[in-house]
Amino acid sequence: MGILAAIVCKVDGVGNEMGHSYIALGVFVLAYGLFVAFPARRSLVAVVAGVVLIVTRTIPLGVALTEGINWNVMGIFVGTLIAADYFIESRTPAYLAEVIVNKAPNTAWAILFICLLTGFISAFVENVATVLIVAPVALSLARKLRINPVNMMIGIAISSNLQGTATLIGDPPSMLLGGFAKMTFMDFFFYHGKLSIFFAVELGALFSFVVLYWFFRKETEKVPVVPTEVVKTWVPAAALVLLIVSLAVSSFFDTGFSYLAGMICMGFGVFLLVWGHHVHKMHFLRTLKRLDWDTTFFLMGIFIIVASLSATGWIDRISDVLSRSIGQNVFLGYTLLVFFSVVVSAFVDNVPFLAAMLPVGLEMSERLGLNPSLYLFGLLIGASLGGNITPIGASANIVAAGLLKKEGYHLTFRQFGRISVPFTLAAVIPAYLLIWFIWR
C-alpha cells in the first residue's frame, strides 16, 4: 500500500506540473493577444494574468514577489517618474527648447535641434514624459510658421525612442535588461572593458540624424523669435543631474545591480515629493496621481508572467528549438534575434516581448558557449528601435499621435512609415554591426 501511495503521489505531482506548465503557456499567449487587441487595457490584462498564475499556484505568491518582480527595476522606474514629473513642472525643458529654437538659423535646423534635445532628455527621462515635455514647443513653432506639424512630431517621437535605449534609466526595456543581466548604470557605457549599448545607440543616431535632415532639408524659412519660457525653479533639474551622478557612482558599489540603484532613485523621488510639498505647496496625492501607474503595474504583471514561463520550463524548450534551428551559426542566430525583434516590436509592445525573450537569449548563448552580451544587447537594440516603425509600436508614438489628433491632424501608418522605416533601418543596422564586431 505504501508503494502504491508513493506511485500515486508521484503521478499526481507530475500531473500538477504538466497542468501548471500549460496554464503558464495559456496565460502567456492569451495575455499577449490581449495586449495587441486592447493596448489601452494592457496594465489590467497583465495584473489579472499575474493574479491567475498566483491563484492557480502556477507560481507561488512568495516566488512571484521575491524572485519574479524585480524590485530594483521598479524602484528605478517609479523614482525617475517622480523626478521627471517635477522636471517637467519646473518648465526647464521647455525653456531649453525655446532657447535652442531661437538660436537655429532656419526652420530645418530648429526642428533638428528639437529632435536632438528630445533625444538628450530621453536618455535620462522616460520616453512618454519626454514627448510631453517637448511637444508643446514643437506645436507652437508649427503654428507660428503655419506648417504641418505631423513630420516634426514623428521626428520627436522616434528620436525619443532611439535615445531612451542608450542608458539604464532611459526607458523600461533598458531597465529590464539591466535587471536581468545585473548591469549597472556605467555598464551601459563600458561593460567588461568594452564599448557597450550607449555607443551602439549613438552610432545608429548619427546615421538616423542624416535621415531626419533629408526629410526636413527644404524647410529654409527663418525661425521667428519664440517668447522664452520662465523657469519656475532649477531644483528639479539639479536633482536630476545629481541622480544621474549618484547612479554612476553606485555602479562601483552595487556591482550585482541588486538594490542600490532602486533605492537611490526612490530616495530622490521622496526628496522631491517632500520638497515640492513644503516649498511649493504641491500636494503629495496630486503629484502621485499624475505618475504613469499604468506602466508600473504593467511591468509588475509582466515580471510574474515571464517568471512563470521560466519556472515551468518553457524558456528552456523555446531556447532548445531556436538553438537547434540555427545550429552552430552564431551570426545567423544573432541576426535572426535582432531583426525578428524589430519586426515583432513594430506591432507588439516591446516591454513584454523583451521580458520574454531575454531568458531565451541567455539560454541560447549558454547552449552555444557564447558571451551572452551579444544576444542580449542585440535583443535590446531590435526590440527598442523596432517600436519606431509604426505609430502603435511604442507608447511615445501613441502619445504623439494623440497630441496631433487634438490639433486636428490624423496620423496614418503611411505618413509615419515614410519617415520611421528609413530612420529605424539607419539606426538599427550600424548598432547591430557594432555590437557584432565588439561582442561576437
Image (cartoon, rainbow, N blue to C red):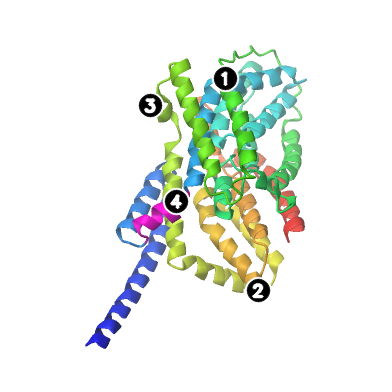
49 displayed left or right of 291: left
- Residue 91's tag is 1
Question: Residue 110: x and y, percent?
Answer: 71, 24
Q: Which residues are magenta?
A: 59-70
Instruction: State which tag comes first along the sequence, 3 or 4.
Output: 4
Q: Nearer the viewer, residue 121 or 429?
A: 121
- Residue 69's tag is 4
Question: Residue 198: x and y, percent?
Answer: 69, 44
Question: SS class of the residue under badge 4?
Answer: loop
Question: SS class of the residue under badge 2?
Answer: loop
Label 1 and label 3: CA atoms lie apart by 21 Å
- Residue 239's tag is none
Instruction: State which tag comes first along the sequence, 4 or 1.
Output: 4
| Residue that label 3 marks | 285
Residue for point 41% across, 63% down:
25
Say which quarter of the image contains residue 56: bottom left
Label 4 and label 1: CA atoms lie apart by 34 Å
Q: Amino acid at mark 3?
A: Leu
Residue 69 lies within the magenta run? yes
Residue 77 lies within the magenta run? no
Q: Amino acid at mark 4?
A: Ile
Instruction: State which tag comes first along the sequence, 1 or 3.
Output: 1
Badge 1: residue crowd in 10 Å (few <14, some 14–19, many ≥20): some
Q: Mark 3 touching mark 2, by CB under 8 A?
A: no
Q: Amino acid at mark 2?
A: Gly
Question: Residue 376: x and y, percent?
Answer: 62, 56
Instruction: State which tag comes first along the sequence, 2 or 4.
Output: 4
Q: Quadrant of the C terminus?
A: bottom right
* Residue 32 visible somewhere in the drawing: no
Badge 3: residue crowd in 10 Å (few <14, some 14–19, many ≥20): few
